[in-house]
Image (spheres, helix red, strand yellow):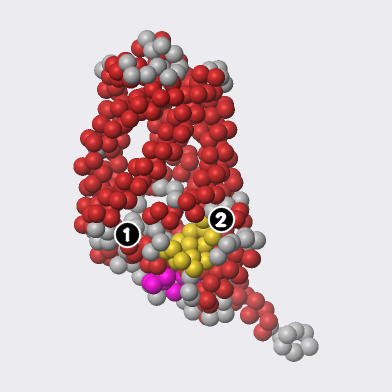
């Protein structure tokens, strides 16, 4: 803690905006309802394909064109996924465009939003197609152990994507350039050095082109790792606040959270593929599919992975919240600026329209980060502890020794 912080009350100049918090609560409640609607729609759609006989029908239509697995799988995926995208387009439009504009969070025009949707769909489609091709190739080559090999493939895929995303994917959605504030660059670079992290520069990106929300991150692996700051963060936050936010990100580096997270997620992915193997085997017998490489098994694969993902989401989120707390603790200890940390969290709540204290069940099931209320409370306890320690040291230094002199 800085000397100045140790001499002032444990309060921040940034306070919660009650009106913004009321809107944040409404916004969060609507988004949760939309999440449930989307979830139910997906379940109904997939079950309709599995139980209504649509999967064998589409498989037969595809096989009338080609018997090759490498071609029949993407054709089936297109016929399976395209209707769902069309059915849920109004929901996506409302949740992704109308709602953020209604609550003043989005700055995008409809045209720009639509372009981003097309880009996202193309990227997801290409990556998803590659993964599907590998899955069905392994189903044919190693039907007993495909899920083990697929787990290793996904591990490699995740590492590669983490390395390449800052230079290949991120620039498709945002424009970014080297940060011009040399003093802030020096502070953040020094912070990275203290954490033992090698970064390839500090960049600002045009977050304001899409939203009023603020954010920052340490992106990439190895030679692509860099600090990126949203222009909305740079404009609204003080240098101290920005430093505490980035110190949190470097806390993840110090605690090796990226590597640990990849390992944990890889184990969960492996378990998900194992469950998918069981479900697909059951489906072949129950619905009379021709084998594991039958494209009609795709909805079974999707439903197995989705159910597993939902079932393990609270576990994944609990892990994430634990690591986030450790990163917060690192940020407070490294910077010694709990007041700036508290102010940054409060400002984020106001600017990002974040629900400061969500219901307990919501945080447990859905949130990957602790509530802002808990994060601010932890910073306040940290400040009080440091103040208490400083006071005891001050009293000790002023206590006269037996010779009557001040120590």
Q: Quadrant of the N terminus?
A: bottom right
- Specify whether 54 is left or right of 202: left
At x 64%, y 66%, the residue is 194
Q: Residue furthest front?
A: 65
The answer for how far apart the CA atoms under marks 1 and 2 are is 24 Å
Is residue 239 within the magenta segment?
yes
Say the numbered circle drawn on residue 132: none
Q: Residue furthest right?
A: 403
Residue position marked by numbered label 2 in the rendering: 224
Measured as percent of width and height from the top left, residue 110 is found at: 23, 54
In this rendering, the answer to whether 64 lies above or below 340 is: above
The answer to whether marks 1 and 2 mark residues whose Cβ atoms lie closer than 8 Å is: no
At x 56%, y 44%, the residue is 159
The secondary structure that most of the magenta stretch takes on is helix
Q: Which badge, 1 or 2, comes first in the chain's sequence?
A: 1
At x 53%, y 77%, the residue is 183
Residue position marked by numbered label 1 in the rendering: 210
Q: What secondary structure is marked by label 1?
A: loop
**Among the 4 quarters of the image, the one containing residue 15:** bottom left
At x 44%, y 24%, the residue is 70
> Which residues lie in the magenta part?
234-241
Q: What secondary structure is marked by label 2?
A: helix
> How many neighbours does mark 2 have within 10 angstroms: few (below 14), some (14-19), or many (20 or more)?
some
């Amino acid at each position: 803690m800085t000397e100045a912080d140790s001499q002032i009350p444990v309060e921040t100049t940034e306070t919660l905006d009650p009106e913004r918090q009321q809107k944040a609560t409404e916004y969060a409640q609507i988004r949760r309802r939309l999440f449930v609607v989307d979830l139910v729609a997906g379940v109904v759609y997939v079950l309709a394909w599995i139980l209504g006989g649509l999967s064998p029908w589409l498989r037969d239509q595809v096989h009338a064109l080609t018997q090759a697995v490498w071609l029949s799988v993407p054709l089936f995926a297109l016929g399976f996924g395209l209707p769902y995208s069309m059915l849920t387009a109004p929901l996506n439009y409302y949740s992704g465009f109308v709602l953020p504009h209604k609550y003043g969070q989005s700055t995008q025009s409809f045209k720009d939003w639509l372009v981003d949707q097309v880009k996202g769909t193309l990227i997801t489609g290409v990556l998803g197609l590659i993964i599907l091709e590998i899955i069905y190739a392994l189903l044919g080559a190693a039907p007993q152990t495909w899920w083990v090999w697929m787990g290793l493939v996904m591990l490699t895929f995740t590492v590669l994507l983490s390395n390449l995303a800052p230079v290949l994917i991120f620039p498709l959605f945002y424009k970014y350039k080297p940060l011009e504030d040399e003093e802030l660059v020096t502070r953040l670079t020094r912070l990275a050095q203290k954490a033992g992290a090698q970064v390839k520069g500090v960049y600002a990106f045009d977050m304001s082109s899409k939203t009023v929300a603020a954010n920052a991150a340490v992106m990439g692996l190895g030679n692509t790792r860099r600090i990126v700051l949203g222009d909305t963060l740079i404009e609204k936050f003080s240098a101290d606040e920005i430093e505490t936010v980035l110190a949190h990100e470097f806390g993840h580096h110090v605690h090796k959270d990226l590597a640990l997270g990849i390992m944990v997620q890889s184990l969960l992915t492996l378990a998900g593929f194992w469950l998918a193997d069981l479900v697909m085997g059951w489906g072949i017998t129950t619905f009379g599919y021709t084998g594991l490489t039958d494209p009609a098994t795709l909805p079974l694969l999707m439903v197995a992975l989705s159910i597993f993902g939902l079932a393990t989401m609270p576990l994944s989120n609990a892990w994430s919240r634990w690591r986030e707390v450790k990163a917060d603790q690192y940020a407070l200890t490294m910077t010694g600026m709990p007041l700036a940390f508290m102010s940054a969290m409060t400002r984020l709540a106001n600017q990002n329209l974040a629900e400061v204290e969500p219901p307990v069940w919501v945080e447990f099931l859905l949130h990957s980060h602790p509530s802002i209320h808990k994060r601010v409370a932890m910073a306040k306890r940290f400040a009080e502890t440091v103040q208490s320690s400083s006071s005891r040291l001050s009293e000790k230094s002023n206590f006269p020794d037996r010779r009557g002199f001040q120590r």
